[in-house]
Image (cartoon, rainbow, N blue to C red):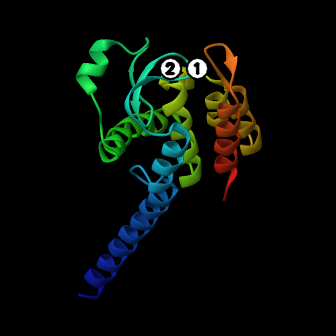
C-alpha cells in the first residue's frame, strides 16, 4: 500500500511538472483576439467614411480603411455600398483586422507582447500581408534582432502612390512607439 502511494505521488509530481511547463508556454503566447486598443488605434488613423472614397494611393475604400479594390471608386461601388453606419464600419474593421492579426501570428516566429501585436496588426492592415511577408522588419523580428532595430523599420514604410505622406510618417512613428512600449 505504501509503495502504491509513493508511485501515485511520483506520477502526480510528473503531471504537475508537465502542467507547469504548459503554463509557462501559454504565458509566452500572445493574447488572442483583436484588442480594443488595436481597434481604436487603427480607426483613429484610418478615419471613418460612410460612403466609398479613394484613399491616398487612389484605391476604392469605405468605412475605416476597408479596401474595395485596387482601383478608384466606381459607380458600382457607390451602388453596392451606398452609405454605411459607424457601427457597420467597426464591424468591417474588426473582420479586416482579424485577417491582419492572423497573418502576424502566422508569420512571426517569436513571442510578442500585446503592444507589439497591436503595432504589427496595424502595420499589416495598412501595408498588406504581401509587403509584410517580404519585409526587412519581419526578417529582423524573426531573427531576434533588438526591438529598437525592428522598430526603426516602421519608418521606412511612409510612401503611398510613390509619395511620402505626413499621415504615414505619424502613423509609423506611433506604431514604432507602441511596438517598443512595455
Callout 1: helix, strand or loop? loop
Give the farthest residue toward the bottom: 2
Where residue 4 sits: x, y (%)? Answer: 26, 81
Query: Count the marks: how many?
Result: 2
Where residue 155 sits: x, y (%)? Answer: 72, 32
Where residue 74 sits: x, y (%)? Answer: 35, 12
How far apart are the alpha carbons under marks 1 and 2?
7 Å
Residue bearing mark 2:
130
Quadrant of res 72: top left
Q: Is residue 19 left or right of residue 150?
A: left
Quadrant of res 81: top left
Q: Residue at x 46, y 62 (%)?
A: 21
Q: Is residue 156 left or right of residue 128?
A: right
Quadrant of res 13: bottom left
Where residue 57 sits: x, y (%)? Answer: 55, 18
Up/down of 56 relative to 101, above or below = above
Assess disc 1: are there few (<14), some (14-19) or many (≥20) residues with their C-alpha within 10 Å of its C-alpha.
Answer: few
Q: Where's the N terminus, which quadrant?
A: bottom left
Callout 2: helix, strand or loop? helix
Q: Which of 64 and 139 is in front in this view?
A: 64
- Residue 109 shows up from this direction: no
Q: Nearer the viewer, residue 139 or 7?
A: 139
Q: Which residue is drawn at 53% across and 30% down?
A: 126
Q: Where's the C terminus, which quadrant?
A: bottom right
Assess disc 2: are there few (<14), some (14-19) or many (≥20) residues with their C-alpha within 10 Å of its C-alpha.
Answer: few
Q: Is residue 130 left or right of residue 49?
A: right
Q: Is residue 117 left or right of residue 76?
A: right
Up/down of 3 relative to 154, above or below = below
Residue bearing mark 1:
134
Mark 1 in CB contact with mark 2 (< 8 angstroms): yes
- The circle drawn on residue 26 is none
- Residue 161 shows up from this direction: yes
Amino acid at each position: 500500500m505504501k509503495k502504491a502511494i509513493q508511485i501515485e505521488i511520483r506520477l502526480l509530481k510528473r503531471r504537475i511538472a508537465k502542467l507547469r511547463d504548459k503554463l509557462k508556454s501559454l504565458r509566452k503566447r500572445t493574447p488572442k483576439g483583436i484588442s480594443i486598443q488595436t481597434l481604436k488605434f487603427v480607426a483613429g488613423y484610418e478615419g471613418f467614411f460612410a460612403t466609398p472614397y479613394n484613399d491616398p494611393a487612389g484605391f476604392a475604400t469605405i468605412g475605416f480603411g476597408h479596401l474595395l479594390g485596387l482601383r478608384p471608386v466606381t459607380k458600382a461601388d457607390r451602388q453596392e455600398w451606398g452609405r454605411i453606419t459607424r457601427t457597420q464600419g467597426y464591424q468591417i474593421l474588426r473582420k479586416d483586422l482579424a485577417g491582419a492579426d492572423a497573418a502576424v501570428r502566422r508569420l512571426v516566429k517569436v513571442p510578442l507582447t500585446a503592444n507589439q501585436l497591436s503595432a504589427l496588426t496595424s502595420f499589416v492592415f495598412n501595408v498588406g500581408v504581401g509587403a509584410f511577408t517580404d519585409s526587412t522588419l519581419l526578417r529582423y523580428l524573426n531573427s531576434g534582432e533588438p526591438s529598437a532595430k525592428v522598430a526603426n523599420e516602421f519608418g521606412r514604410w511612409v510612401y503611398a502612390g510613390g509619395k511620402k505622406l505626413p499621415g504615414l510618417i505619424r502613423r509609423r512613428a506611433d506604431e514604432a512607439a507602441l511596438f517598443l512600449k512595455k
